Image: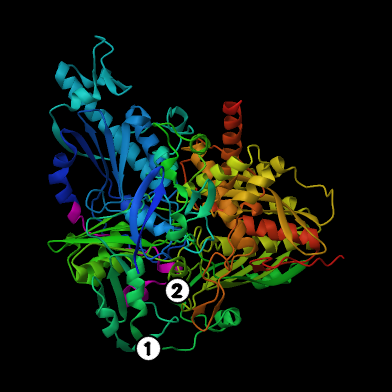
Amino acid sequence: MNTTREKLVAEPERYEFSAAPMHQFELARREFFKILGAGIAVFVVAKDALALQETAPGSRSFHNEELPKEITSWLHIGEDGVVTGFTGKAEMGQNIRTSISQTIADELRVPFESVRLIMADTALTPFDAGTFGSRTTPTMTPQFRRVAAAARDLLIGVAAKEWNVAPEGLIAKDAKVTDPASGRSLRYAELARGKALAQNLPAEDPVTPATEWTLAGKPFPKVDGRAFVTGRHQYTTDIRLEGMLYGKVLRPPSFGATLTSYDDNTAKGTSGVVIVRDGDFIGAAAPSAHEAQIALDAIHAQWKEVPQISNEEIFSYLKQNAEAKSEDRFRRQKGSVEDGLASAAHRLNATYTVAYIAHAPLEPRAAVAQWTDGKLTVWTGTQRPFANRDELAATLHIPESQVRVIVRDTGAAYGGKHTSDAAIEAARLARAAGRPVKVVWTREEEFTWAYFRPAGVIEVKSGIASDGKLTAWDFHNYHSGMSAIETPYDVPNQQTEYHQVPLILRSGSYRGLAATANHFARETHMDALARVAQLDPLEFRLRNLSDARMRAVLEAAGKSFGWPGKKTGEGQGFGIACGHEKGSYVATCAEVVVDRASGSVRVVRVVEAFECGAIVNPDGLRNQVVGAIIQGLGGALFEAIEFENGRIKNPHFATYRVPRFRDVPEIEAVLIDRKDIPSAGAGETPIMAIAPTIGNALFEATGVRLNNLPLAPNGVQTLNT
Amino acid sequence: MAKPMEIEVNGKRYPVSYPPDTPLLYVLRDELGLTGTKYGCGEGQCGACTVLMGGAPRRSCQIPVSAAATKSITTIEGLEKDGKLHPVQQAFLDTGAFQCAYCTSGMVMSSVGLLQTNSNPSETEIAQFLQGNVCRCGTHPRIMEAVRQAAKRMQERGR
């Protein structure tokens, strides 16, 4: 367990996965028709596929040489006409099961209802680096388009052979191939009948442009929606196997504590209880979670604790402990910041901070592990099934080929479910117990032993000319990360630098990564500069922007919001912010009201314009955009992990405040559909601009400039009282 | 000490044997296999485990199984009648009021509880009533819409 903990590093290395060999493919292919029955299977080879998946903005040292030829996606057309697509991606509420199914149906010319997906199962689906970085829509949907287009060609070929005609004139439509010359047709199901035809095809077939989509681009409801409203869907936490035990893990009292003494004599005496001690890992498995907990409570373990950084001193610590080595940095330079500052009419320096926050997905980390004849099957809610498989194999000292990881559609992740902790814990306990074991983390464990969005310090120095044009931009991020670290504004002189700091709390991905922190600092600073320049904040941004897509979302948000807002009451304020990342663009406007007496903050209205190229499913997209705004409200206003000497002080929903119904403003999402631009992902970017938007609105409402996230955990006192 | 007792869930009586202070949630999920009721926090702070007890929404992680033994319990699995969804379930489905949907069971049960005592709740009343239910995906506006829609349909049906 410690090895995996140490392997978890801060953001820059996140994307450095090594491509795993395709053991499971040969196996799956032989078994393929056994599992799915006769039919036609199409495998698409795209050697650039892994590079596409793993290259993320900001990744510096990704090694993309020597990528093997890869099978990236495949689908099967059965004798019953059911089309099955296979992908290593996982469904966690982002609704890709629906959007990918739409894409396959659209390209293969079959009804939406005839498509099903098998997802995130290391024994059945192609290798996949993980479901993160908003990569599913830009990489997986085009791959399925190619595989579906290839399948369509293959079906036409089969029909042409059947009829002994040239394939050129045949048409694939409505789940059948038709020969317009003779009027005859054969359904896909009929063409697949009695076949066991597997074909590798190059990913070269032209695919349908967005302007001609019929099923993609339309609002489709979530696949299997009925299973969710009836409680029938089985999440990982709901799995019950014959003879299954429930596992619990003894946690150290604080981060960095090491085991010094251990006595499990009392605990071991309980019948039906299995105790495992392996290094610093201590766990119990019992017929119920309650009995497992009683067994753990009976273990006498002593730990040596070491002093740890607390949240009072975190920001000064981060500044003082930045790594000096150049390879730990990201640095971009253009022109001379010194000259730009010297020539500026106005200069502004400011420091911004962001707190650690927790993902707190409602389904906690969980896993069920089962050993059969030395082979391990683990069901777990993870964003990285293949990496989990490799980590399980490495930790348990067994070959990867002996491990299968299956991800049921999961109760959310938000970047928080990359690691394999619960899987390893369940597997270790199950091995000792000789029976299946389920481990479900408690909410307190979630808030303590999962990882956090890292805290950070951001320092900005800037200069503007008398006409409001930026002349200099100097931006330094300590620790929080480098996603969206570069300014989208036109600045002739700029320096941007990311300074890595060794981890303090366990940290990792969070929806949008550091894009939330970097946008908070940049867009708060831009707002402050607009005030210095005595320009309207929207006008000031447009004056410094030449990116047409960015201008378009800003103008769309401003128009729908009615920017600039007119104050009609006391304590009212309006804010705006924008940004782009991972191929999509966002601009957000908000209205806030601050109660003068109590200082309490109410976000009244939010308008967000979002553009991610051609929209695949406007209904799912709207859910993601509105959801990101609401989730972002928490980090903007009140979410913060409090910690002292290695202990989390607020590991409960009662003390760690998340957005609830009464926090939710009136929200309007303005979705811009650009059919001329390839679809980008939309899970992350819509969250980036909400925090600075609210901070800027609070400034207008109160005259107080708030440079720290969360902005107002205890409200904000106005200056103009 | 495990104590034998009987609980009534979704109109069926089940004999169970548990220490009296065992939370109802674990009996429902681990013993009866009614896993539609979710664990979210075990502290009564998130609402994912909401069931109806004697018709009123309760956090099943906070109810000792012994206290449940005298009341009739309804879980998410008990709402559908003869293959027909409860109007609240139907409204959640129609409005797409879920993303990861892990909170959905609790949201539906709380909403059913609300509409039993207030057939035409205002916006503020819905928000107030569902304040104890956490949705981390941020689907709140659609959930509010689903409750309004369900209220309307139930009123029309009742007329």
For this rendering, which residue is in front, A501 or A462?
Answer: A501
Q: Earlier in the sequence, mark 1 or mark 2?
A: 1
Image check: A398 left or right of B150?
A: left
Q: Is residue A681 visible?
A: no
> Which residues fall within the magenta stretch?
A1-24
Query: Can you give x and y, in whole percent of width and height, for residue B100 in the image?
Result: 45, 49
Q: Which mark is residue A477?
A: none
For this rendering, which residue is in front, A221 or A135?
Answer: A221
Name the element at disc 1.
Answer: strand
Which of discs 1 and 2 lies nearer the camera? The answer is: 1
Count of marks overlaid on the render: 2
Task: Say if A565 sits above or below B151 in the image.
Answer: below
The amino acid pointed to by label 2 is Arg
Task: Say if A316 sits above or below A186 in the image.
Answer: below
Q: Residues within 10 Å of mark 2 (few under 14, many from 20)?
A: some
Q: Is residue A14 magenta?
A: yes
Image check: A674 left or right of B102?
A: right
Please name the residue that numbered disc 2 is placed on. A506
Q: Is residue A191 magenta?
A: no
The chain to which mark 2 is attached is A
Seen at 40% across and 61% down, the residue is A417
Query: Can you give x and y, in whole percent of width and height, for residue A620 in the image?
Result: 49, 41
Seen at 23% across and 62% down, the residue is A436
Query: Can you give x and y, in whole percent of width and height, for residue A401 in the image?
Result: 17, 60
The amino acid pointed to by label 1 is Gln
Please name the residue that numbered disc 1 is placed on. A302
Seen at 58% across and 28% down, the residue is B158
Looking at the rendering, in which quadrant would you find the C terminus of chain B?
top right
